[in-house]
C-alpha cells in the first residue's frame, strides 16, 4: 500500500503543478491558433498567459506559504529525549556527479542538527529518509558528531513513510519527547502524520521562506512560481493525507 501511495503521489503531483498546468494551457492555446479552433485558442492563451503573469509577478505563493509556516513555532520549553531530522536536503544526483556531499535548498535541516546536538548532547538523533541518512552517516565523523547517539532510517522515501521507518530504528520510545526538524512549510503535514503514528513530537521548524508578519514582494517570476508550486504541493499533500487517514485533521494544530 505504501508503494502504491508513493507512486501515485509522485505521478499525480507531476500532473497538477500550477506552473506546469498554466504553461501547458498557454502552449495549447498557441497551438490552437493555427487550427480551426483559433478563437478558443486565443481565449485560452490569453487567460493562461494572464494568470501566469499574475502568479509570476505577485506573491501568491507567499500568501499560501504564510499560514503553513506560521502554524507552528519552535517548542523550546522541553528537553527532548530524541531529535528527528527529516530528509529532503541531500541532492543525490549532484553529489554523485561531483563526488562530494551536496545539500540543496533545505540545508537548514542539516544545519539545525549541529546546533541541536550541542544544545541537547544526550538526545538520540534519528536521520529519516533515504539519501540524507546515508550522507549524514558518511559525514558523522568529519562533522565531529562521533559522540552523538545517532541512528539512520535509509529506507523511507516520503513523509508518509518516515514515522513507521523511524520507529524501527529509534532506541528511545516514540512516546518520549521528540523534536521534529523539517522545513517550516512542511511542519503541519509532518506533525500530523507523526502524531497519528503515535509519536510525541514537538515542532522545530527551519528553512523559512516567509517573514512572520507579511509578504515579500519581488518581481522575480521564477522564484514566485517555485513558491507557488511548493505551497500547492503542501496544501494538496495535507488534503491527500487527511483523505487517506494519515492525519487526524486537514490542518494539524499546535
Image (cartoon, helix red, strand yellow):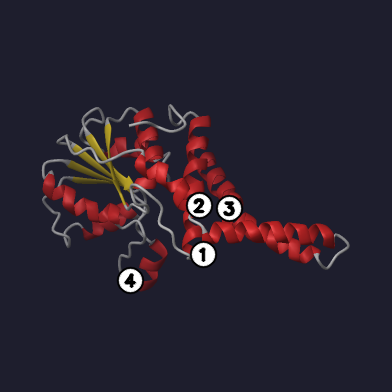
Give the residue furthest to the bottom: 98
Q: Residues within 10 Å of mark 4 (few under 14, many from 20)?
A: few
Marker disc for residue 18 = 3
Q: Position of residue 158 (x, y in %)?
A: 43, 45
Q: Are the residues flagged by discs 1 and 3 in contact, CB closer than 8 Å?
A: no
Q: Residue at x 71, y 60 (%)?
A: 46
Relative placement, left or right, of 240 versus 156 is: right
Q: Secondary structure at mark 2?
A: helix
Q: Residue at x 55, y 57 (%)?
A: 55
Can you tell which quarter of the image residue 42 is in?
A: bottom right
The residue singled out by tag 1 in the image is 221
Whole-angstrom CA distance, mark 2 to mark 3, is 11 Å
Whole-angstrom CA distance, mark 4 to mark 3, is 34 Å
Q: Position of residue 58 (x, y in %)?
A: 51, 57
The first of marks 2 and 3 along the sequence is 3
Q: Residues within 10 Å of mark 3 (few under 14, many from 20)?
A: many
The residue singled out by tag 2 in the image is 60
Q: Nearer the viewer, mark 2 or mark 4?
A: 2
Residue 75 seen: yes
Amino acid at each position: 500500500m505504501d508503494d502504491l501511495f508513493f507512486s501515485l503521489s509522485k505521478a499525480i503531483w507531476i500532473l497538477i503543478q500550477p506552473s506546469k498546468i498554466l504553461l501547458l494551457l498557454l502552449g495549447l492555446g498557441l497551438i490552437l491558433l493555427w487550427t480551426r479552433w483559433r478563437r478558443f485558442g486565443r481565449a485560452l492563451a490569453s487567460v493562461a498567459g494572464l494568470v501566469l503573469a499574475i502568479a509570476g509577478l505577485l506573491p501568491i505563493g507567499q500568501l499560501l506559504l504564510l499560514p503553513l509556516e506560521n502554524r507552528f513555532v519552535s517548542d523550546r520549553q522541553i528537553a527532548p529525549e530524541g531529535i528527528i531530522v527529516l530528509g529532503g536536503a541531500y541532492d543525490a544526483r549532484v553529489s554523485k556527479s561531483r563526488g562530494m556531499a551536496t545539500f540543496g535548498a533545505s540545508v537548514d535541516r542539516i544545519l539545525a542538527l549541529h546546533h541541536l546536538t550541542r544544545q541537547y548532547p544526550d538526545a538520540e538523533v534519528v536521520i529519516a529518509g533515504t539519501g540524507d541518512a546515508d550522507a549524514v552517516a558518511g559525514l558523522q565523523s568529519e562533522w565531529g558528531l562521533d559522540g552523538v547517539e545517532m541512528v539512520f532510517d535509509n529506507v523511507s522515501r516520503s513523509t508518509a513513510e518516515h514515522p513507521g521507518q523511524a520507529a524501527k530504528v529509534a532506541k528511545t520510545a516514540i512516546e518520549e519527547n521528540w523534536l521534529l526538524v523539517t522545513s517550516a512549510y512542511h511542519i503541519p503535514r509532518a506533525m500530523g502524520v507523526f502524531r497519528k503514528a503515535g509519536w510525541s513530537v514537538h515542532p522545530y521548524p527551519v528553512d523559512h521562506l516567509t517573514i512572520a508578519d507579511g509578504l515579500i514582494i519581488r518581481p522575480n517570476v521564477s522564484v514566485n512560481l517555485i513558491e507557488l508550486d511548493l505551497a500547492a504541493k503542501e496544501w494538496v499533500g495535507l488534503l491527500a493525507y487527511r483523505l487517506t487517514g494519515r492525519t487526524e485533521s486537514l490542518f494539524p494544530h499546535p
